Amino acid sequence: MVHVPYRGQAAAMTDLLGGQVQVMFDPVVSSIAHIRAGKLRPLAVTTSTRAEVLPDIPTVGDFVGGYEASVWFGAGAPKNTPTEVVDRLNKEINAGLADPTIKARLADQGSTTLAGSPAEFGKLIADETEKWGKVIRAANIKAE
């Protein structure tokens, strides 16, 4: 494979759909509509388990042992935001993620909801930073 850097997902997807590139690593949530329309053929998912929305598609880990790379999204606030504001935002976001309509809509788009506390989210960020830092150091990746 040859890495082709793009300035964003939209331009990369346009080139993939137009046949300018042959393969792309893209979050399920942003490619599922094209998959359902028959415009894209999924080859594998990069998460450690198969995607509920694409149950017949294997994981990369099925072919490359130990492979796992997933995308996650979260909400953040400036460092000095009062604790009571952070707690209120956390409570409301978790309530939204627990709402059956919202949960079903996100699942239909290929997302898995992960509600939790600000401390749990901080731990996720720290764990992911450590994990990918090890990958960067092992591969001797340098900023250009």
Image (cartoon, rainbow, N blue to C red):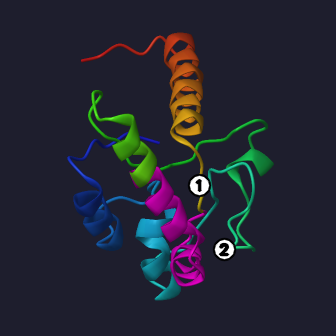
Q: Quadrant of the C terminus?
A: top left
Give the image location of residue 67, x and y in percent: 69, 38
Q: Is residue 144 above or below residue 8?
A: above
Residue 130, located in which quarter of the rendered image?
A: top right
Give the image location of residue 53, x and y in percent: 64, 75
Check disc 1 and report the residue beneath it.
Answer: 115
The residue under the point 74% across, 40% down is 64
Label 2 Cα neighbours within 10 Å, binned few <14 / some 14-19 / many ≥20: some
The residue under the point 32% across, 64% down is 13
Q: Main secondary structure of the magenta part?
A: helix
The image's mark for residue 43 is: none
Check disc 2 and report the residue beneath it.
Answer: 54
- Give the left or right position of residue 62, taking residue 1 as reference: right
| Region rendered in magenta | 89-112
The residue under the point 24% across, 52% down is 8
Nearer-N-terminus badge (1/2): 2
